[in-house]
Amino acid sequence: MADSAIEPNACRWCHAPQREHYQRWKRPVGWHRFAHPTDAQRLTRMRARRTKKEEAKRG
């Protein structure tokens, strides 16, 4: 995951927050409605966010 600012509960496919989503286009799924992320995606996103916060505290 390149962007550690992605919200943990953002769309499974395009990373847009649910409240801003409606319908979007993203490869490879094409046009899609909001899809809840998998548990593994949520965990990865939370860990990335935590790491980013810890790095910001260090300097």
Image (tube, helix red, strand yellow):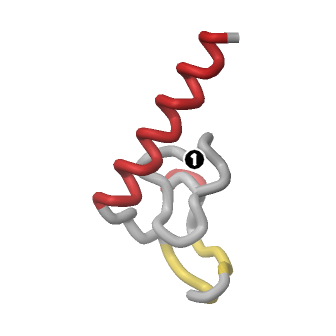
Q: Report x, y in % for residue 39.
A: 29, 58
Task: Tell me which corner region of the image, top left, top right, bottom left or bottom right, holds residue 47.
Answer: top left
Q: Report x, y in % for residue 9.
A: 42, 51
Q: Is residue 55 left or right of residue 13?
A: right
Which residue is painted at 59% across and 29% down in the image? 52
Q: Report x, y in % for residue 13.
A: 53, 72
Q: Is residue 11 left or right of residue 56?
A: left
Q: Is residue 4 above or below residue 58?
A: below
Q: Quadrant of the N terminus?
A: bottom right
Q: Is residue 49 above or below residue 59?
A: below
Q: Quadrant of the C terminus?
A: top right
Which residue is painted at 40% across and 59% down in the image? 41
Q: Residue furthest left?
A: 39
Q: Nearer the viewer, residue 15 or 23?
A: 15
Q: Secondary structure at mark 1?
A: loop
- The amino acid type of the residue labelled 1 equals Ile
Label 1 crowd (10 A; few <14 / some 14-19 / many >=20): some
Which residue is painted at 57% across and 47% down in the image? 6
Question: Number of numbered discs present?
Answer: 1
Q: Report x, y in % for residue 56.
A: 65, 17
Residue at label 1?
A: 6
Which residue is painted at 33% across and 59% down in the image? 40
